Amino acid sequence: MANNTFGIDLGTSNIKIYNFADDSVMVEKNMIAIEGKNTVFAYGDSAFDMYEKAPSNIHISYPLNNGVIADIKNMETLIRFFVSDLMKGTLRPADYIIAVPTDVTEVEKRAFYDLVKDAGVKARKIMVVEKAVADGLGLGIDVKNSQGVMVVNVGYATTEISILSLGGIVLSKLIKVGGFKFDEAIRNAVRHEYNLIIGEKSAEKIKINLSEMESGVNSTLVYGRDIVTGLPIEKDIPTQLVDKALEESFATIIDSVKVILERTPPELGADIYRHGIYLTGGASQVNRFASLLHKGTGLKVNISDKPLESVAIGISKIIKDDNYKSLAYAIEGMGGK
């Protein structure tokens, strides 16, 4: 493939773009801030910094929702801005590979293709790859061989559970539980327990802090508004409260993993038993989830080193390695020669 080649993984919370020219992955918040009717005020991480703080004339939103495109115009704008940044401000003709979820309709898959085609990024050739296949590659698995592999990708809005074999997807299930549901559960628990209202970003911070803490530390500090007095206060939130708040969401994911395992052909099931489950995605590192998944299924859980970037890393292998090129395909009736 030509030097100007990009691999795009659109997540609800983060957009990841692999740039072949310098062999790097850009990770930015998939967010846009619009001032007034249609002036782009900020995008990516800088838009996220303003989130929950902006005045009423600045509208900040995620253009992607539950793994599908909710706001095409703003999503096209974001792609154009990010690609332009990666090309140092001058858009040149380029090839694109875009990752799509498996468990969505053909119309929704086509929307991802159209997004890049209509984004004004001078796309020469656009190919798509199943997100779970790219994930497997990014986790260092040779997805083209015949052994069965289970990949669980816990994203911000959704969790995708897939069984891979011979470069394809045998089974796949997309459920609407992920980092956002985790944050919401934490906010509700804090409100219920302490009469304290915290923002989405604060809930995410609690989640991240507790994931990164060494064992022995059993609380994290959070700022919010007291419901009774209406005044801002700080509060120590114990790990125990967060663990309890997340139980229901974790159980939903683990139950879905079990359902997929029950539907897996026995030979592939034997492979998965031997190799375990591969866990990735931006929200997969949350406190105790991996150990609960192991406990709930009895299987070994392999945790990704770079959970946020695994799909983009997988696309980079498709771009660089001829052995994997066939994993990306053109959608019928579209220019992917």
Image (cartoon, helix red, strand yellow):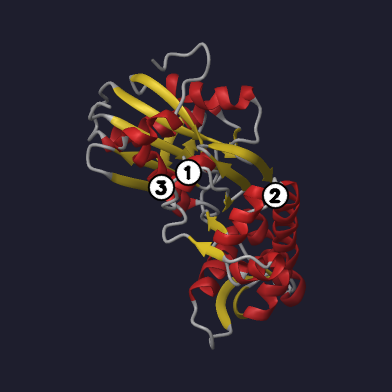
Question: In front of the other: label 2 or label 3?
Answer: 2
The answer to whether residue 142 is seen in the rendering is yes
- The residue pinned by badge 3 equals 28
The residue that label 2 is drawn on is 266
Give the distance between the C-alpha atoms of the residues marked 1 and 2, in whole angstroms. Answer: 18 Å
Q: Earlier in the sequence, mark 1 or mark 3?
A: 3
- Is residue 194 found left or right of 61 in the rendered image? right
Residue 89 appears at what percent x and percent y? 24, 32
Q: Nearer the viewer, residue 272 or 226?
A: 272
Residue type, label 2: Pro
Residue plotted at (50% across, 20% down): 114
The secondary element bearing badge 3 is classed as: strand
Q: Amino acid at mark 1?
A: Val
Q: CA distance from mark 2 to mark 3?
A: 40 Å
How crowded pointer 1 is (Cα within 10 Å; few <14, some 14-19, many 20+) is rated as many
**Which residue corresponds to mark 1?**
143
**Percent x, y for residue 67?**
60, 39
Find numbered disc 1 in the image and state the secondary structure of the residue it sits on. Answer: loop
Q: Position of residue 281 (x, y in %)?
A: 52, 53
